[in-house]
Amino acid sequence: MFKLIPWFSMLFVADLIPVLGAKDIFILAGQSNMAGRGGVNHGKWDGNVPPECQPNPSVLRFTANLAWEEAREPLHADIDVEHVCGIGPGMAFANEIIRIHGSGIGVVGLVPCAVGGTSISKWEKGSRLYNQMVMRANKSLKDGGAIRAILWYQGESDTVSKENAEAYQGKLVKLIQDLRFDLKLPSLPFIQVGLASGEGKYVETVRKAQTGIKMENVKVVDAKGLPLKPDHLHLTTISEVKLGLKLARAFSPKL
């Protein structure tokens, strides 16, 4: 269902990031566990980059200044600027996509958009975060390529109140519909992460809302059971890696 389109062969010079044409582009959106808190302790990132998250000349990142560069952790350092970012699932996802598809793929482009501590109401159409995400997604296409999927990990902030948790499903459905309309991609795959934790006691309510969505090309990759940091909210580095691998396999179910 989620199939990557083979590219024309191209020469890639690692030391000089060229203006590339075709890219398979993925939007990374949501809150802190997508932005990445792996390896962050006491306000500092430990700098540990697992093998699955190492830089790869075939993985690019769309910067806050709307330019492509070789992707390096932390991917969201210039996006989620009010927080200290560490390892998230993005690099492990991209490297695994390349491993799975081999010569059938050229360059993966990642567009970080996640911001920690944001409820889904902060992502509604017309909001600053929504407008920024759509703008970044569209600008990422300026040198060619195609948006292949949105990877969404959000909902922890909506577990605090029963009202917000019960309203989550309707708001997420509307968000998916709005994004597909505004990006002019009516069947755009939307891969959401089932919550592993939450800021409040209504985690299961939000999880039920996530799994209850029955829309074409909408999937849930469950993070429940992945080890958490001592704050019982954020994924550890190894958990972020495992999540990235799971997301890649969800995107490529037949491979």
Image: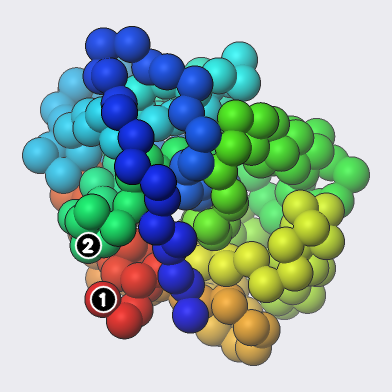
Q: Mark 2 points at which residue?
A: 100
Which residue is drawn at the image coordinates 33% and 62% (left, top)? 248
Asked if the residue under mark 1 is in contact with the one under mark 2, i.e. CB atoms within 8 Å, the reply is yes
- Report the amino acid beneath label 1: Leu
Q: For the C terminus, which image quadrant?
A: bottom left
- In terms of depth relative to the viewer, which is nearer, 228 or 6? 6
Q: Is residue 240 above or below residue 167?
A: above
Which residue is drawn at the image coordinates 36% and 63% (left, top)? 247
Q: In this view, does 36 lie to the left or right of 12?
A: right
Which residue is drawn at the image coordinates 33% and 42% (left, top)? 9
Secondary structure at badge 1 equals loop
* Residue at the outermost left position: 51
Q: Where is residue 161 in the image (x, y as percent from the top left)?
A: 68, 64
Q: Position of residue 174 (x, y in %)?
A: 80, 68
Label 1: few (<14), some or many (≥20) within 10 Å? few
Label 2: few (<14), some or many (≥20) within 10 Å? some
Question: Could you tell me if residue 231 is visible in this image?
Answer: no
- Report the amino acid beneath label 2: Ile
Q: Mark 1 points at which residue?
A: 255
Tell me the quarter of the picture where residue 103 sits.
Answer: bottom left
Which residue is drawn at the image coordinates 49% and 21% (left, top)? 19
Q: Is tag 2's residue or tag 1's residue first in the polypeptide sequence?
A: 2
